[in-house]
Image (spheres, coloured by chain):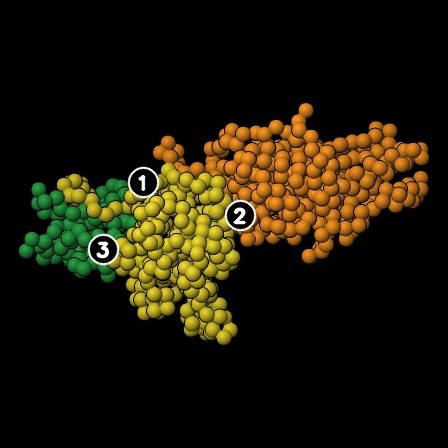
């Protein structure tokens, strides 16, 4: 058993990153994720002599990540919604140049400067695009502080496996809440193999390496896109993660990720106690999305509710999966307001009565 | 008079080569317009890398602009950065691999307009990199629009009646500005319009690369260059215009040089 | 007088005829050819056998197509006035005037 600690989600991520053998972190303060940079500047260099740098902006941060990743480093950054918006150009370049790295978004409410309270309003930005061009981020959605820690190393491993950026999409509540977390052992820095494509300096035994997302010839650009799409298909085939709870006998299923899934779980318990067979599907990867799991449940349930801290974003993917076979509702609160299980129970009861 | 190739090559066997394309410059035809200063700047930068024997430790960063394809010509490992972000990319590389020689190669739009923030903060942190800054007072790749360094009354496709300070601001002397920062270690402005200036510019680039080993701060070599195509001139005429118009506003010379102690204590 | 004897070779197919070398040559020994290369440019050639190998042309050349040679004092052979490289077959080049150059 690994070391147990009581930690904030943001700190757990930072600690996990040090232990996963991070080479570098570049970031910029923004509430509610500033603890990441604070923790790392306090801890990281002293322990593993890795690089931690406070950049002048999120734009600089993500481009520092690009440079470090291109040179073969295990690198990451973190921010919250407005900062992640600023990073979208860089993320598109990183995806285009196929650089492995990790980004954490501790989602706060928007649009605009919005609020510093938790939100899931960045679902579209995370899974449907964000930046320009045809690309995908692998998106991991933790629901516990434990997962926030675990997904750091898992995310980097996925990033390396597919040469693709990986996004951890959490929210302000998960970032700030304290929970027990079991930490993995320290991986020694430098034990990860340097990728052969990285710009480490041209030696006599190989041609120069260059990292670019520029392919000016249409035929070449199309081939690059086709190759990317092949890669994304492979990821969809291999890397979907989803948690199903009591869906087998369920008459109604809540679909929720991250913080909402914790509420959804409580709702399920309350309603099961009242004799209504409610199940829960928790997508852990938001891209690739567990369409098949939702579709399978649609074979026998009477309805779905997509429970989100937004105005209705993931519900589109649930509807895609269900494909009209039964009603799919959405319930969400915004502005940093977290719905109580009781209010969700009422929503489901109302919806359920209409279905029957 | 006609001579066959064989006849000529035979003669050259007995002579010493005193100047040739450096091995660090790939044998590719550059896409630059006839007479463009980028070609000279590329060559002398690569000559400097060759002479220092640091090809294996050098990582370059290309910008967005005409030199976006620099990595097709420079035979060193390179990364292509987003517009304006070259020094942030270089920071990421250098911070993780401080033993490498890292340089950026950027135009005026990239460095002094969209990338001003990154440029200022990179120099302010004193990142141990070389910034090669090509200033030709115009946006080349996009077709001759106003640059931050476009001169007053200079006509561009977006200042068709000439740049007016009251409306578009003044040409930005960003190199002078950056030289004020404590993080700047070596700052100089050069040109590549004459043989003498090419020699000086190359010397500056050699220094800018070499000084990285001192870990004393950022080296910045501005190269005042031309853009015959978008200036609407023949190359020879463009270089004359450069002397008459660019150099009075952007005077050549060192703005910040290391002290003797800086170099000796290294 | 005992001038240093030099020579240049020009990769004419990659020359873009910008004429900067012509202006930079202190001996006025260079010109643009009447012919054009495959890119369509009037390429640079050495037209006077007075090259000193000063390297000025090569220094200002944006396309790095000029190689400069300087005479090896031991042999003292008379030098050619132009050369092409990186071209195949039997290309011959015509250089400016049928000159006078005895050096």
Q: Circle 1 — which element?
A: loop
Colour of chain C in the image: green
Number of numbered labels in the structure image: 3
Which labelled disc corresponds to residue B53?
1
Identify the mark at residue A63; answer none if there is no mark.
2
**Disc 2 vs disc 3: which is toward the camera?**
2
Q: Measure the alpha-carbon separation of dots 1 and 2.
A: 29 Å
Q: Is residue A67 left or right of residue A145?
A: left
When asked about the image quadrant of residue A171, the answer is top right
Label 3's element? helix
Horizontal and vertical percent position of residue B187: 37, 57
Q: Which mark is residue C56?
A: 3
Q: Position of residue B43 (x, y in %)?
A: 32, 49
Q: Residue at x 37, y 65 (%)?
A: B250
Residue at the (66%, 27%) spot, across then down: A2
Chain whose colour in the figure is orange: A
Is residue A37 or residue A116 the one in the foreground? A37
Left/right placement of residue B202 relative to residue A311 reads left
Q: Colour of chain B?
A: yellow
């Amino acid at each position: 058993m690994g070391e147990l600690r009581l930690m904030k989600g943001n700190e757990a991520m930072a600690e996990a990153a040090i232990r996963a053998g991070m080479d570098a972190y570049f970031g910029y303060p923004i509430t509610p994720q500033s603890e990441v940079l604070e923790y790392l500047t306090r801890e990281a260099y002293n322990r593993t002599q890795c690089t931690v740098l406070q950049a002048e902006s999120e734009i600089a941060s993500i481009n520092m990540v690009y440079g470090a990743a291109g040179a073969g480093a295990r690198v990451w950054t973190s921010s919250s919604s407005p900062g992640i918006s600023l990073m979208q150009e860089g993320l598109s370049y990183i995806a285009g140049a196929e650089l492995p790295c990790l980004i954490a978004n501790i989602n706060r409410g928007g649009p605009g400067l919005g609020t510093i309270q938790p939100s899931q309003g960045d679902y579209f930005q995370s899974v449907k695009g964000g930046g320009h061009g045809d690309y995908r981020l692998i998106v991991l959605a933790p629901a516990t502080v434990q997962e926030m820690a675990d997904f750091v190393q898992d995310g980097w491993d996925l990033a390396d496996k597919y040469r693709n950026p990986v996004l951890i999409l959490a929210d302000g509540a998960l970032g700030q809440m304290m929970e027990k977390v079991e930490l993995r052992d320290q991986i020694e820095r430098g034990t990860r193999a340097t990728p052969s494509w990285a710009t480490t300096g041209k030696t006599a035994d190989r041609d120069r390496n260059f990292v670019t997302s520029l392919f000016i010839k249409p035929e070449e650009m199309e081939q690059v896109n086709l190759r990317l799409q092949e890669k994304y298909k492979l990821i969809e085939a291999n890397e979907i993660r989803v948690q199903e709870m009591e869906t087998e006998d369920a008459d109604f299923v809540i679909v929720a990720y991250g913080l909402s899934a914790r509420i959804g779980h409580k709702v399920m318990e309350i309603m099961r106690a009242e004799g209504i067979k409610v199940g829960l599907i928790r997508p852990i990867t938001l891209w690739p999305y567990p369409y098949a799991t939702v579709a399978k449940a649609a074979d026998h349930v009477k309805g779905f509710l997509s429970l989100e801290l937004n105005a209705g974003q993931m519900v589109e993917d649930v509807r895609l999966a269900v494909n009209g076979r039964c009603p799919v509702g959405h319930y969400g609160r915004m502005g940093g307001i977290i719905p109580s299980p009781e209010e969700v129970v009422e929503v489901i009861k109302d919806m359920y009565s209409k279905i029957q | 008079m006609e001579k066959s190739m064989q006849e000529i090559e035979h003669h050259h066997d007995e002579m010493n080569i005193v100047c040739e394309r450096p091995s660090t410059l790939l044998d590719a035809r550059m896409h630059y317009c006839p007479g463009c200063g980028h070609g000279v700047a590329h060559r002398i930068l690569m000559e400097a890398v060759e002479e220092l024997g640091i090809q294996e430790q050098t990582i370059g960063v290309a910008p967005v602009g005409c030199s976006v394809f620099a990595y097709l010509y420079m035979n060193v490992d390179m990364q292509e950065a987003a517009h304006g972000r070259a020094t942030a990319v270089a920071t990421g590389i250098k911070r993780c691999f401080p033993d490498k020689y890292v340089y950026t190669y950027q135009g005026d739009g990239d460095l002094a307009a969209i990338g001003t923030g990154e440029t200022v903060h990179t120099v302010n942190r004193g990142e141990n990199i070389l910034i090669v800054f090509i200033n030709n007072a115009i946006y080349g790749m996009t077709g001759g629009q106003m640059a931050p360094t476009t001169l007053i009354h200079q006509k561009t496709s977006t200042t068709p009646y000439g740049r007016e300070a009251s409306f578009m601001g003044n040409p930005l002397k960003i190199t002078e500005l950056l030289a004020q920062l404590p993080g700047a270690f070596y700052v100089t402005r050069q040109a590549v319009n004459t043989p003498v200036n090419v020699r000086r510019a190359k010397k500056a680039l050699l220094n800018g690369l070499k000084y990285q080993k001192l870990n004393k701060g950022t080296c910045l070599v501005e190269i005042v260059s031309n853009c015959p195509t978008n200036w609407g001139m023949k190359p020879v005429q463009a270089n004359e215009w450069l002397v008459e118009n660019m150099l009075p506003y952007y005077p050549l010379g060192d703005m910040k040089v290391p002290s003797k102690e800086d170099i000796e204590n290294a | 007088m005992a001038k240093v004897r030099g020579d240049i070779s020009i990769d004419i197919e990659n020359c873009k005829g910008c004429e900067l070398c012509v202006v930079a040559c202190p001996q006025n020994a260079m010109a643009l050819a009447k012919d054009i290369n495959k890119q369509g440019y009037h390429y640079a050639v050495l037209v006077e056998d007075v090259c000193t190998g000063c390297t000025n042309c090569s220094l200002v050349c944006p396309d790095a197509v000029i190689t400069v040679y300087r005479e090896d004092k031991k042999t003292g052979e008379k030098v050619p006035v132009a050369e092409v490289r990186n071209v195949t077959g039997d290309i011959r080049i015509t250089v400016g005037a049928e000159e006078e150059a005895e050096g």
